Amino acid sequence: MLSSEFEYNLKDEKIASHPVSPRRSAKLLRVPLCGELEHGTFEDLPSYLKDLKCDSLWVNDTKVIQSRLYLVRPFGGRLEIFLLEPLVGVTEIALSNRTTSSWKCMIRRVMKWKSETASLNLDGLSLTVTPTDKIAGLIRNEGGTYDLTFNWTGAPSFGDVLDILGKMPLPPYMQRESDSSDSIEYQTVFARLPGSVAAPTAGLHYDDTLLEKLTEQGLPISRLTLHVGAGTFRPLSEGSLSDHTMHAERCLITRDTLNHLASTTRRVATGTTSLRTLESLFWMAVVHHETGEFPQVLGQWTPYNNEKSACRATPFDSYEDAMHYLLKHAPLNPTWDFRTQIMIRPGYKVRSIIALVTNFHQPGSTLLCLIAACMATPWENVYTTALQANYRFLSYGDGCLIEL
C-alpha cells in the first residue's frame, strides 16, 4: 500500500483556524457500519452512544504545555523555539525543575542564531537559553532537533516559566500565531497531566454541559494518558507505508484504568491518541506473554505479520482477557510508564473499541491511515461527503463518529 493513497485535496478555506462556540455545537458526522451517513452535532453524541450500548467512553487527559517560546537574540531579532521533550527523565520532573531544565527542541531560522545564546526578560522573570553542550555548541541532531538548556530567575519552576512566557503550540496549518484565547480553547476540559505539545483534538468538542449529559446517561468519562508529540504532524514518507517510521509517544496507565478496561466490552474512544493507547495495551500483553518482558518502547510493527500488511495471531481470545493478564503482570507501581510506536493502518484489526470519535485529518498523515483502518465505508467517500457539506477540518474543526 502506497502513501499516495492517503492524499486528498484540502483547500485552506476548509481548515478551521478557530473553534466554534459552544464546543458541543460542532458538527458530528455519524459513520455507521452499514447504511447512510448521518449529520448531527456533538450534542447528539449521548444519543448516538446510547444506540451503540456504549459502556465506557475513553478520553486522553493529557495537558498541552505552552511549549513555543519567542526569545530575543543578542544582536536583535526574534528566535522561535519549540520544546519537544526533556533530554533526561520525564516531563513532570523537567517542568518542576527550579533553576535549569534541558530539552530537545526545534528552532525556527536557526541559521540566524549566531551567538548561540538568547534571552527574555518580562515582569521580573529572566530566561536564558544556550546549547546544552557548551563546548560543542549548537549541534543539529538527527531529525532536525537541538539540545538546549534553559536557565531562569523570577519563577519557582520551569512549568511556571512556560505558563508566563510560553505560547500554545498551534499546528502550522492554522497559519497564525496563538492568542490569549488559545490557552483555553486548545486544551480539553479534562486536561490534567502536562506533557503534550499538541492537543488530543477530538476532545476539544467536549464542554461541561456535554459531560453532564453523558454522566446523566450513565457514561462518565474514563481517562487514560498519552502525551502527544510533534511527530503527530509528520507526513507519511513517500513510497510504501512500510517505509514510514512512526514517532513514539509516552503512555501512563494505572491499575484503575486496567480494571475498568477489563470490566467493560463496548468501549468508545475519543481521539486517535486514546485508540493508540488502548490498542498498545493489548500488544504489550501479547509481547509479555511471548517474551516475559515489557518493552520500554512498543515497536511500530509489533502487531503485524512479516509482510506488515495484516495483524498476526495472538494468544488472547478477547481484549478483556489481555487486560486481565496485564492486571497480573504489568509494573503498576502505581503508574505504568511506556512509549508506543505502533502504526495503525489498513489491515490492522482493532480490538479495544466499538466506535471512535475523531476529527477530520490531514492529507498524507498517519492519522488518516488510522481512520482508514477503522472505517467499513471507504474513507474517501466519508471525506468527500464532509467537504461537500462544509464540515470544518483539522484541529479546531468538526468531527465524526466511526462505528466499527
Image: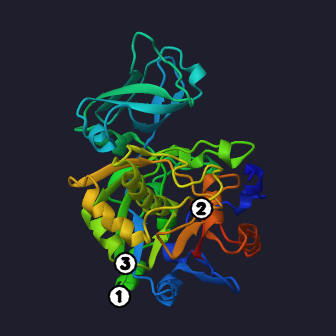
Q: Position of residue 299 (x, y in %)?
A: 49, 46
- Depth check: 293 or 368 in front? 293
Mark 3 burial class by Cα count in 10 Å: few <14, some 14-19, many 20+? some
Marks 3 and 2, how far apart at CA = 22 Å
- Amino acid type of disc 3? Thr
Mark 1 vs mark 3: in front: 3
Q: Is residue 190 left or right of residue 228?
A: left
Write down the quadrant of residue 103 in the picture: top left
Q: Which disc is residue 264 wearing? A: 3
Q: Is residue 189 visible?
A: no
Q: Position of residue 262 (x, y in %)?
A: 33, 72
Upstream in sequence: badge 1 or badge 2: 1
Q: How many marks?
A: 3
Q: Dividing the image into 4 quarters, which one contains the C terminus? A: bottom right
- Amino acid type of disc 2? Tyr
Marks 1 and 3, how far apart at CA = 19 Å
Which residue is denoted by mark 2 in the rendering?
Answer: 348
Image vertical order of residue 90 relative to residue 216, above or below: above
Image vertical order of residue 257 relative to residue 72, above or below: below
- Depth check: 151 or 229 in front? 229
Image vertical order of residue 401 relative to residue 193, above or below: below
- Marks 1,3: beta carbons within 8 A: no
Q: Residue at x 67, y 84 (%)?
A: 34
- Depth check: 241 or 237 in front? 241
Q: Secondary structure at mark 2?
A: loop
Which residue is denoted by mark 1 in the rendering?
Answer: 216
Q: Secondary structure at mark 3?
A: loop
Upstream in sequence: badge 1 or badge 3: 1
Image vertical order of residue 261 relative to residue 280, above or below: below
